[in-house]
Amino acid sequence: MTITDARQQLLAANAAAAEALRQRFRRAGTLVVNLISSPGSGKTTLLAATAKALAGKLRMAGIVGDIATEHDADKLRAAGLPAHQIVTGGSCHLDARMVQKALGETAFGELDLLFLENVGNLVCPANYDLGEQFKIVLLSVTEGADKPFKYPGIFSKADVAVLTKWDLLPHVPFDAAAVRQQIATLRPGGVILQLSATTGEGLQGFFDLLQERVARCKATAR
Amino acid sequence: MTITDARQQLLAANAAAAEALRQRFRRAGTLVVNLISSPGSGKTTLLAATAKALAGKLRMAGIVGDIATEHDADKLRAAGLPAHQIVTGGSCHLDARMVQKALGETAFGELDLLFLENVGNLVCPANYDLGEQFKIVLLSVTEGADKPFKYPGIFSKADVAVLTKWDLLPHVPFDAAAVRQQIATLRPGGVILQLSATTGEGLQGFFDLLQERVARCKATAR
């Protein structure tokens, strides 16, 4: 077996595990989203703000992946979100079996919305289906306007792109129009949001999107 | 052969190729550095500033890795640095054979200093030796202060850590003392620099370090 064969086998096994998860989530009527970005683009901060804003409206939880540390799960729990940390110990992405295992170790109860916060990495997580209904890619304005075309995999696969740290826009060179054009080329019809978890600007649009998609998920649950 | 065996074989082959490169660079008296960071931390911008500042003082070139696009090599060439782009087409890191192949396709001539700008990714590039004399990890202040302990692989392997976008410090929450402490724990005795390629603050310290290491490399060339 060559390295390519081994990789194909791994991806096929992941696809099967992901499909089983997707059916399980669909039966439960749980919307599952997979959040992917570079390190430090604001995934955890956005989820913490979401947990606070939608507390009492939606039953939510989070599974968080990192190479090392429990920081992110601690931060989410402090914001009131039940959270489970997966420490990958070196792996550059979550995979469907890690999510299966994590679900077996948690007691989240019935959920309307489950966040899967991936390892901070714009490359590898794009290739691993976790059984989610859709992917959200985050890009902070401090990362520069050339990123969608440099990382086409994730920007073509994510249904929703969120431009974060919008409050820093006056301080950095960031051509938002160019970024929107690249994303629209890679993912025609995808949603593009802009927001700042620091000032609160644009957050409501993100909350509305989640609530609307949860409602649609419930309507089609079986 | 299992996936683990295949991976071990791949890493062993890379280590052999990297060692051959290192001997070749040592004989030539060329200092080679491997720059690693998240997407958008400022690797290309720092190299462009370095190319302009040290033009005429050192013979320099760059090999740049990206999943897609030739943006970075174009940007380096515009700054006067001879540059070769490796488009990995999906691979999340450079490896020693890619560098060997790139060297065969370029005509850089005799060099004092060769920059290997890795794919934007804090995880995978840490595991692949490229035959460099040392690694430089960049972390921008906008990425947050929890990163060294979340990505211990690269912060323990990099001889030099550069905190970039220092001009944005007043606008973001970033505990620089905590970051320095994490890095010092992971890499005792490592060098930590802080700079802004936008304002120029701290750049001279980076240039001095490179010139001093080039001189040391020449002194020990054989």
Image: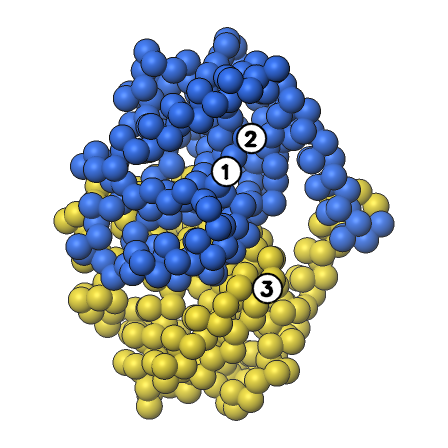
Chain colours: A blue, B yellow
Q: From mark 2 to mark 3, how far is it between C-alphas?
A: 27 Å
* x then y, percent, for residue A177: 31, 58
Picture quadrant where residue B35 is located = bottom left
What chain does badge 1 belong to? A
| Residue pointed to by mark 3 | B88
| Residue pointed to by mark 1 | A135
Q: Up-down: is A102 above or below A170?
A: above
What chain does badge 2 belong to? A
* x then y, percent, for residue B206: 30, 69
Circles 2 and 3 in contact, beta carbons < 8 Å: no
Q: From mark 3 to mark 1, how far is it between C-alphas?
A: 23 Å
Q: Amino acid at mark 3?
A: Thr
| Residue pointed to by mark 2 | A132
Q: Amino acid at mark 2?
A: Glu
Picture quadrant where residue A213 is located = top left
Element under disc 2: loop
